[in-house]
Amino acid sequence: MKQTKINGYLMSDIYGQTGVEYVFEPYLKGKNGIKQIDMSVDGGIVSESTSVEATQGSDVVLTIDANLQAITEKALVNTINDIRNGTYGERNKYEATAGAIVVMNVNSGEILSMASYPDYDPNVWIGGIKQDVYDRLKETDALFNRAISGTYAPGSTYKMVPAIAALQTGAVTINEKINDVGIYQRDPTHRCWIYRQSNKTHGYLNISDAIKHSCNYFFYEIGYRIGIDTINKYANSFGLAKKTGIELTGEKEGMIASPALSKSKGEIWTLGFTLSAVIGQGDNNFTPIQIAKYLSILVNGGKQIHPTILKTIINSDGTEVSKEEINNGIDQRLGREKQVEGDIEISDENLAAVLEGMRDVTSESGGTAYSIFKNFNIKLGGKTGSAQTGKSTNAWFAGFAPYDNPEIAIVVVIEDGGSGTLACYAARDIIAQYFGMNEAQVEENTAAIPYTDIQN
């Protein structure tokens, strides 16, 4: 895998959008030298001497894979355009104007690629950006990094959180079947999505089936059984509604649906709030990078990870900067607090049941992503999500591959993308690139662009 280097100038969209320059400036800049020049009265140079040698800046080596990054950016733009243009059929035509993708190593937390759209050419900053260009970027919201700053209701991509919570607390077993009758009797205003669409039900389902079919009724029942406090305890353990601490500026915390939050807004918490929260709606709002972290922790069996874009920093003399020094500096520049997070206890049996449901989403007829991945060469797991936000619906896909020995988690969100199934198209292209199914390779240009900074 090829890492992207930053040598003191803009290298890719991720650089300009997320503030890498600010965070790593002390290492990128190097140190100025001092040269004394003696001149004669007629302006001729008599002698030169260097009292302090200049020090070259360090190489900041990112975890970003250059080829995967290029494909990620392209896949995001293409999928947004295809949805907007009705390429997938008129029924699947939505406004779709923005989105984000995060691809993460599930064991290390390393970010392999990350994209936000609308985006821009980072070269416009070199030598100072023109005012009209800057105004246009602000107008199009291209400076907003949706991958770490956009907060969205996660929809059904959230359902694995209450699934694990219910299984681990014994509120439901892997074999127990719950009968989806369409209208949830404890609160008839809540109905399964399939009942709302076609007046049908999913019938009797175990937890794997409920994930495969994304059955809201099943999750209403486990939400009732375990309650909002237990759901939120697990959500927080998975890193949701908390900054990940990635080495970038502008990261948002998001928020989690809770009685305390409702009380602050003058609302009285009822069962209906729990039922909305358990399927990823209500006040739940998380960033794509948080969803990628949560998914990674889930598929690696509960091991905590810390998302990062930094592979290493190499000084000009070839020595490597210590992780402790780097982290202390980043903590100070970002105001980042030390995070002490324990692993999540998930039994092998319970984990297998949840991951099997995610596998069936992509590999079995009736799975919500089956139509996209049915002929795919890579066995994977995933979960689609269609999260309502006012009059529009955001499209989500959260998946991992390969299924048997997970390496990567991939999260796609498309604003007003309509259906989570449509977000799968972008994920499919990226997974194909990662596993070598695409032949095209990107040649990275690491030659620095000449630029002189004149100081008066």
Image (cartoon, rainbow, N blue to C red):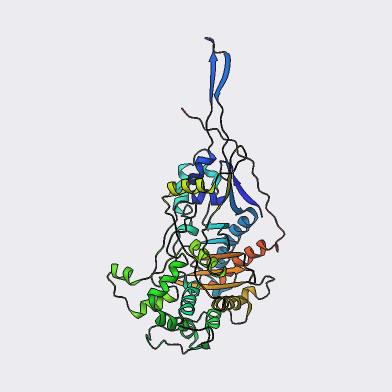
Residue 394's place in the image compared with 191, above or below, is: above
> Measured from the top left, where is residue 296 in percent x and y?
55, 66
Outermost residue, left direction?
Answer: 266
- Which quadrant would the N terminus be assigned to in this image? bottom right
Do we see residue 391 in this rendering?
Answer: no
> Measured from the top left, where is residue 233 in percent x and y?
41, 70
Q: Nearer the viewer, residue 12 or 295?
A: 295
Does 166 sit left or right of 322 as displayed?
A: left
Quadrant position of residue 81: bottom right
Residue 104's place in the image compared with 399, above or below, is: above
Q: Residue at x 52, y 30 (%)?
A: 32
Quadrant position of residue 268: bottom left
Residue 85's place in the image compared with 446, above or below, is: below
> Measured from the top left, where is residue 193 in percent x and y?
47, 81
> Measured from the top left, where is residue 300 in percent x and y?
57, 68
Q: Residue at x 70, y 57 (%)?
A: 440
Outermost residue, right direction?
Answer: 439
